Image (tube, rainbow, N blue to C red):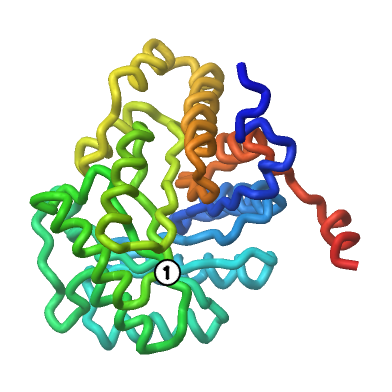
Amino acid sequence: MNQFRLSRRPDIGEKIRVSFEFFPPKSDEMEERLWDTVTRLAPLNPRFVSVTYGAGGSTRERTVRTVRRILGETDLPAAAHLTCVGADRAALDAVIAEFAAMGVTHFVALRGDPTEGVGSAYRPYPGGYANGADLVAGLKRHGDFDISVSAYPEKHPESPDFATDIEMLKRKVDNGATRAITQFFFDNDLYERYVERVRRAGIYIPIVPGILPVHNIGQVVNFSARCGAHVPDWLRERFDGLERDPQTHALVAAAVAAEQVLDLVERGVGDFHFYTMNRADLAFAVCHMIGIRAVSVSAAASAAA
């Protein structure tokens, strides 16, 4: 194997940037697990961490509380998710102001899934922001925020074609989006072709691949079917017979995610966004394999001195 491959360079970990996504906990036990995850991943010095926002603002208070705690108890830059679902402009503007008041400068602006769930017909909320592009424009009216948006290597399941899908991304960029984070995917060729399409359309913001470590293959297959993401046969076969063997499942999952990320590194990708599912081990292992090392508090203090 070529020892000069990009992913094997000793300094590659210094050139790669990562971010982590969490969802707000629903119970004290889940909050404890989330905080264990935050504490475990924080020493990797992510570019930012983000906290999701449920359909119709169903997790708004928990999202606010989680973001506030991250900002107050860690040095991590925290991005707050916002969706258009289930709220009018005045209500969302109040949420934006609340986040801004606590020091949030980075938002992940999404249209959001219908309140009836993925696969249902989407209808803009009366008096609300119509879509992700409209929400980006609304955020920019409030301040010069860093705004991430969504992108779909296999196109959004509701888009009739790639041209329509990419036109929506272009509207988001024209309104002020600074970065796009993709829906998870498992075929890197799909991502590469998508980036080529986007560049031909005159869109030059970073298109950051969203990486989903497979904690449960059954759940991944079911969710992928609803959101239009392809699960290759080879991926299913990797997990065959491991339903009752969680240790081997975790080892295979780490290997699969690392294989995907290392291949993207070889293709020149330098930014990755991990959908952690509030679990640290797989994301931590993959980051270690691409050369990112945890920085201890004492080491960070010495470097700053």
Q: In the rendered image, which quarter is residue 80 located in?
A: bottom left
Q: Is residue 24 above or below residue 212?
A: below
| Residue 53 shows up from this direction | no
Q: Secondary structure at mark 1?
A: loop
Type of the residue with mark 1: Thr
Would residue 201 be found to the left or right of residue 62 on screen? left
One can see residue 7 in this view: yes
Residue at 36% across, 22% down:
235
Q: Quadrant of residue 175?
A: bottom left
Q: Position of residue 157 (x, y in %)?
A: 16, 48
Q: Which residue is mark 1?
A: 178
Q: Residues within 10 Å of mark 1 (few under 14, many from 20)?
A: some
Rendered residue at 53%/35% (across/down): 266
| Residue 98 left/right relative to 159 | right
| 241 vs 197: above or below | above
Residue 49 placement (x, y as % from top left)? 54, 59
Residue at figure coordinates x 21%, y 78% from the top left: 129
Q: Residue at x 86, y 60 (%)?
A: 303
